[in-house]
């Protein structure tokens, strides 16, 4: 039986490989799902591409809310926060997200965490954006590269972001 995590990784890998092949003029196909790396791919010539997959989120808890395991993004939760703001017990900006602020910070944290392991040769990190906001990631790639410049990244095929709509990939490194 396939777990929810595996289903997310499979959908992410399939969307990424289609876009990657088109961008890189390659012919990789998913051949195996495993744990580290999450997905193994091969092309017609026998070349391998190993994918480690993670998700990013605008605010902590967003993924669990999207998966229906939390009500932190519900209308009731938002009303409760607004009532706290009106009563002077919360800051209105506590639930505001900014691409060049907390959203980018979360992405950098995820990349650093994944960089602690070695996924072997021919690895790429694929980060799936879980935010429906439609962030313009291309605008902050230089900032992200600068923040990652001192980090040893074990991904010789790069660090990539797959958009929420799964219609674009952006190479971060």
Image (cartoon, rainbow, N blue to C red):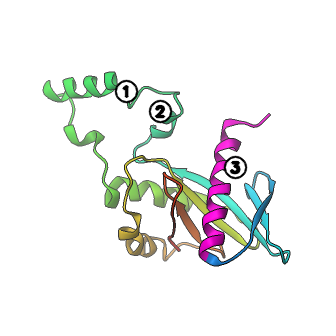
Separation of residues labelled 3 and 2 (CA atoms): 21 Å
Residue 154 in sight = no
- The picture quadrant where one finds residue 157 is bottom right
Query: Residue 10 bears which disc, if any?
Result: 3
Left or right side of 66 for 152: right
Label 2 belongs to which residue? Answer: 65
Q: Assign the magenta stretch its main secondary structure.
A: helix
Left or right side of 95 for 61: right
What is the span of residues highlighted in magenta in the rendered image? Answer: 1-23
SS state under label 1: loop
Give percent across and percent down for residue 51.
Answer: 69, 62
Give percent across and percent down for residue 85.
Answer: 18, 30
Disc nearer the start of the sequence (3/2): 3
Separation of residues labelled 1 and 3 (CA atoms): 28 Å
Figure check: 87 above or below 41:
above
Label 1 belongs to which residue? Answer: 74
Left or right side of 84 for 15: right
* Badge 1 density bin: few <14, some 14–19, many ≥20, Cα 10 Å: few
Residue for point 60% across, 61% down: 126
């Amino acid at each position: 039986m396939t777990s929810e995590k595996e289903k997310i990784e499979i959908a992410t890998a399939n969307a990424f490989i289609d876009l990657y092949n088109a961008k890189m003029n390659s012919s990789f196909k998913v051949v195996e799902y495993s744990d580290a790396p999450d997905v193994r791919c091969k092309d017609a010539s026998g070349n391998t591409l190993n994918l480690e997959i993670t998700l990013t989120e605008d605010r902590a808890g967003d993924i669990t809310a999207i998966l229906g395991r939390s009500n932190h993004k519900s209308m009731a939760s938002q009303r409760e926060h607004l009532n706290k703001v009106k009563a002077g017990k919360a800051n209105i900006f506590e639930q505001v997200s900014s691409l060049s602020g907390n959203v980018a910070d979360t992405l950098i944290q995820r990349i650093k965490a994944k960089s602690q392991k070695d996924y072997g040769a021919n690895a790429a990190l694929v980060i799936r954006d879980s935010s429906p906001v439609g962030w313009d990631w291309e605008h902050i790639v230089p900032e992200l590269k600068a923040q990652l410049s001192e980090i040893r990244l074990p991904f010789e095929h790069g660090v990539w972001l797959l958009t929420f709509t799964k219609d674009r990939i952006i190479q971060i490194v």
